[in-house]
Image (spheres, grey):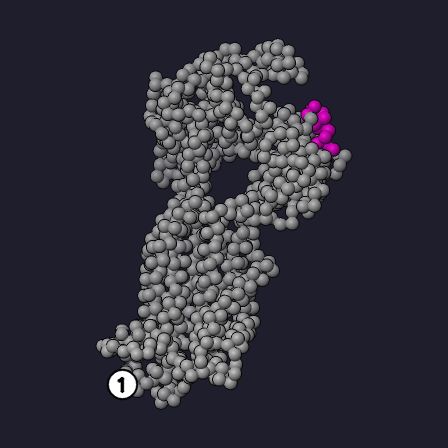
């Protein structure tokens, strides 16, 4: 009965392990997905972008599509009220509104043929409109670059989700059509998307979303690879884990996932295998007698398997319940560390079915070897069986000095397999705890924060921080008085103005480079037409727009220098610039992201006057207002200055310090050179660091200044991203700690089971030792040394595994997590090993005390 209780406990604990892990993993995954859905803007599997109504009907009818939603983008809300907010105006059907979290919680969607509109509470707040059904409001809208003011009747609203980037106003499709007609905008407009249909779809599952989108296109003769007549752009909702796995399941990721799954299975296997091994060894005489009366090995294996299933029927349900409760208790604690992740506790049937299946498979695998052992033993061997291996025939025993350590070591060597498995079980807990602390400790905050911000603070016009903002222009320039106010507030250690280009500047490149740079957006025919219309220099190179930065020294110091020396940029007389190259998420240079090399001469053309030539008639116009409708225009520089520069350095600009958009080659100049040659002084942003201890004060000042003094400005701070980083790190530490605790519990139970069953099976032997003169103190010392042997062996094994796994694990994770720099310490191994050493001595002493409660005579009579 005791062995059965231990076996049920072992099976239940294994089910607890699987269920709690699955609960935590699925719950966090579901929470991540829900949060990311809101960041992405919807939960549809994928979509077809900027298509015609006929294409939308065609794709929606495909058998692969299980549900679909439609949306038409009209324009963006304009005006001072929306300086810091991204507000989209569009039509969406019921499915699309639901998938995009735009379904009104009060009221309803607008009805066709009316002047109704629905909006989120943020839009209403910015407009100063009380959320009441029937309220009238006027909204300025930029439609394909044309401004119109439209008045609507509020028919519904919903709470603005802080996790979502954009706010929305929904109109009837009939109103979208009337506004487009009034403004003379025909879909897709000059921007390629106004008034077009966007079709979002749901498939049968989130696996292989991209492949399914491609198959739908291919079924009707369309593709999404090469721009052309049959080209349709697609979008995959990367919030789905299935979509992420199908896109990123490379060898390193697969190795890490397989390793984690193997570790979990091995942990469950070790404890259950040991329980059945000990159980079969205890009943080996009984199995021998069964064989003597004719039971076959196959029948013995079946008996053990049925016993395992019966014990599983008792242990697995208990483990599923306890594991779900444990996982459910940990999920809110873990998700509390994550910004915007809802504490969703998954109760999916697949969770329980998967955990039960894993536990059952582990049980069946674990009882295979003990079953074979019972089947192989002969009746005679079974009667004489003792734990350990029998000596080989003719082998001589060497006389050894008898001591308590020698006896403890001999006892450990009796069943080397059981000893090794027990040590491995304990070592796994130690290694897992080490891996957790190493993993969480290797998150590199500098890498993480540098991706989002290079300095402590960046102050700029609010439009600079808006995704999809228009190209930097004089209206977005940061006023000098704002910089003076920041510096006057005190606490600024160092700072720099970064000037942005607001006048036309051209470079000259080869035809092949031009095709490669713009080929991702235009067809081959369009590229050839563009090349024919472009001006060229004396060397035959084609002109193209160049993007310039003007940076003061502190900003230059934040750049990543790939080659060369940036100090020359601070000398205006040197006429030096730096060419900006791209880096991937891991800091590796993208070699073909720029044409200029170190030491090259770059000619920049500063255009002071343009003319506009109609390619159909050859007529040139000096003013756009003079151009007749329908003219096909190209720009020509008629007044300009050409300046030659030497490339002094190749650099990468941190994401936080760039323009926020791309499509042109970029160059960096010193601030004085920029002001002198461009003739403009528009400040794009002011980047600065705080003195030690002054960060909180500057944060409060900027919050007040951008909120009350000049609301057209906004700022970013490193502290915000550092807090976000810390929450992610703490989440992994907590999750890994919970996993380590469960595995450690399994290891301790395995150790406890090995010690207790070992002492129980040796009660007569221990009684004989007492009868021949071994004192109680010596007996306890011998058993304590055995326990210490287990734990010291486990600690040594853990140290070896940690030393071997460290470089491999670190290299694999660094390839997967871009803000990871592997750092490892062996202190967690030594600390947890010391704790196990205490248990290694305490558990045998407690078991010995319980075994010695019966008199020696009674224990000597025991079989």
Indicate the secondary structure of the residue bearing disc 1.
loop
Residue 190's place in the image compared with 337, above or below, is above
Identify the image quadrant of the C terminus: bottom left
Predominant secondary structure, magenta span: helix
> Which residue shows up at 29% across the image and 77% down it?
395
Return the x and y of residue 553 as percentages of the image width and height: 36, 27
Residue on which disc 1 sits: 773
Residue 175 left/right relative to 617: right
Return the x and y of residue 95 as percentages of the image width and height: 69, 44
Return the x and y of residue 488 as percentages of the image width and height: 39, 30
Residue 711's place in the image compared with 365, above or below, is above
Q: Residue furthest front?
A: 394
Quarter where residue 676 is shown: top left
> Which residue shows up at 44% across the image and 25% down it?
595
Residue 178 among magenta residues: yes
Quarter where residue 448 is shown: top left
**Is residue 224 visible in the rendered structure shown here?**
yes
What is the crowding at mark 1: few (fewer than 14 residues within 10 Å), some, or many (at least 20)?
A: few
Q: Which residues are magenta?
A: 174-185
Q: Residue furthest right?
A: 113
**Is residue 683 visible in the rendered structure shown here?**
no
Residue 246 left/right relative to 729: right
Return the x and y of residue 842 as percentages of the image width and height: 35, 72
Q: Name the foreground residue: 742 vs 380.
A: 380
């Amino acid at each position: 009965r005791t062995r059965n209780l231990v076996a049920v406990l072992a099976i239940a604990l294994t089910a607890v392990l699987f269920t709690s892990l699955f609960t935590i993993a699925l719950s966090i995954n579901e929470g991540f997905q829900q949060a990311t859905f809101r960041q992405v803007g919807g939960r549809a599997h994928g979509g077809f972008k900027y298509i015609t109504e006929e294409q939308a009907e065609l794709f929606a009818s495909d058998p692969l599509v299980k549900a679909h939603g439609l949306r038409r983008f009209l324009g963006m809300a304009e005006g001072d009220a929306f300086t810091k907010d991204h507000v989209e105006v569009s039509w969406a059907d019921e499915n699309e509104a639901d998938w995009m979290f735009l379904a009104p919680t009060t009221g309803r969607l607008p009805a066709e043929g009316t002047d109704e509109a629905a909006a989120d509470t943020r839009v209403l707040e910015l407009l100063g409109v009380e959320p009441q059904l029937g309220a009238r409001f006027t909204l300025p809208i930029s439609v394909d670059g044309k401004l119109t003011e439209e008045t609507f009747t509020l028919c519904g609203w919903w709470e603005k989700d802080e996790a979502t980037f954009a706010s929305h106003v929904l109109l009837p499709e009939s109103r979208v059509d009337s506004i487009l007609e009034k403004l003379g905008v025909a879909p897709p407009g000059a921007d390629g998307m106004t008034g077009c249909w966007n079709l979002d779809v749901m498939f049968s599952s989130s696996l292989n979303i991209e492949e399914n989108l491609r198959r739908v296109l291919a079924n009707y003769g369309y593709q999404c690879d090469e721009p052309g007549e049959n080209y349709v752009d697609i979008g995959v909702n990367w919030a789905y884990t299935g979509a992420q796995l199908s896109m990123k399941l490379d060898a390193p990721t697969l190795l890490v996932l397989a390793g984690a799954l193997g570790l979990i299975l091995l942990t469950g296997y070790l404890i259950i295998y040991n329980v059945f091994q000990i159980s079969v060894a205890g009943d080996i005489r009984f199995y021998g007698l069964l064989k003597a009366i004719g039971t076959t090995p196959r029948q013995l294996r079946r008996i053990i398997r049925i016993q395992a299933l019966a014990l599983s029927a008792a242990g697995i349900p208990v483990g599923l319940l306890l594991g779900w409760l444990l996982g459910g208790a940990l999920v809110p604690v873990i998700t509390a560390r994550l910004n915007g992740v809802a504490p969703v506790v998954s109760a999916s049937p697949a969770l329980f079915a998967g955990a039960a299946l894993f536990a059952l498979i582990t049980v069946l695998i674990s009882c295979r070897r003990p079953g074979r052992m019972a089947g192989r033993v002969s009746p005679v061997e079974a009667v004489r069986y003792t734990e350990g291996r029998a000596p080989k025939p003719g082998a001589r025993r060497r006389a050894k000095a008898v001591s308590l350590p020698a006896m403890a070591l001999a006892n450990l060597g009796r069943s080397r397999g059981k000893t090794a498995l027990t040590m491995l079980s304990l070592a796994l807990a130690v290694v897992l705890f080490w891996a957790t602390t190493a993993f969480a400790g290797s998150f590199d905050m500098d890498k993480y924060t540098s991706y989002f911000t290079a300095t402590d603070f960046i102050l700029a016009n609010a439009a600079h921080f808006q995704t999809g903002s228009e190209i930097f222009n004089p209206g977005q320039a940061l006023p000098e008085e704002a910089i003076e106010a920041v510096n006057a507030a005190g606490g600024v250690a160092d700072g720099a103005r970064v000037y942005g280009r607001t006048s036309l500047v051209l470079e000259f490149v080869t035809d092949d480079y031009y095709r490669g740079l713009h080929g991702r957006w235009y067809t081959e025919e369009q590229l050839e037409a563009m090349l024919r219309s472009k001006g060229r220099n004396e060397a035959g190179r084609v002109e193209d727009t160049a993007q310039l930065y003007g940076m003061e020294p502190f900003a230059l110091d934040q750049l990543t220098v790939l080659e060369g020396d940036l100090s020359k940029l601070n000398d205006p007389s040197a006429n030096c610039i730096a060419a900006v190259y791209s880096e991937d998420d891991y800091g590796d240079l993208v070699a073909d992201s720029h044409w200029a090399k170190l030491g090259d001469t770059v000619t920049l053309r500063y255009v002071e006057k343009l003319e506009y030539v109609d390619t159909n008639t050859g007529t040139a116009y000096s003013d756009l207002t003079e151009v007749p409708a329908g003219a096909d225009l190209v720009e020509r520089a008629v007044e300009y200055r050409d300046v030659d520069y030497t490339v002094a350095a190749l650099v990468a600009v941190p994401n936080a310090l760039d323009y926020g958009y791309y499509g042109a080659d970029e160059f960096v100049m010193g601030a004085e050179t920029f002001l002198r040659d461009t003739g403009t002084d528009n400040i794009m942003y002011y980047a600065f660091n705080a003195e030690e201890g002054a960060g909180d004060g500057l944060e409060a000042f900027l919050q007040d200044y951008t909120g009350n003094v000049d609301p057209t400005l906004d700022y970013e701070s490193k502290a915000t991203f550092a807090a976000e980083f810390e929450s992610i790190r703490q989440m992994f530490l907590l999750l890994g700690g919970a996993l380590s605790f469960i595995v450690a519990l399994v290891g301790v139970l395995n150790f406890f089971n090995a010690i207790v069953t070992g002492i129980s099976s040796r009660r007569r032997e221990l009684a004989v030792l007492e009868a021949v003169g071994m004192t109680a103190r010596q007996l306890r010392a011998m058993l304590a040394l055995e326990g210490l042997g287990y734990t010291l062996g486990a600690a040594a094994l853990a140290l070896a595994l940690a030393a071997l796994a460290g470089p491999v694990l670190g290299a694999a994770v660094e390839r997967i997590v871009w803000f990871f720099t592997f750092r490892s310490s062996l202190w967690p191994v030594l600390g947890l090993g010391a704790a196990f050493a205490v248990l290694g001595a305490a558990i045998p002493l407690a078991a010995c005390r319980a075994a010695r409660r019966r008199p020696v005579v009674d224990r000597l009579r025991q079989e």
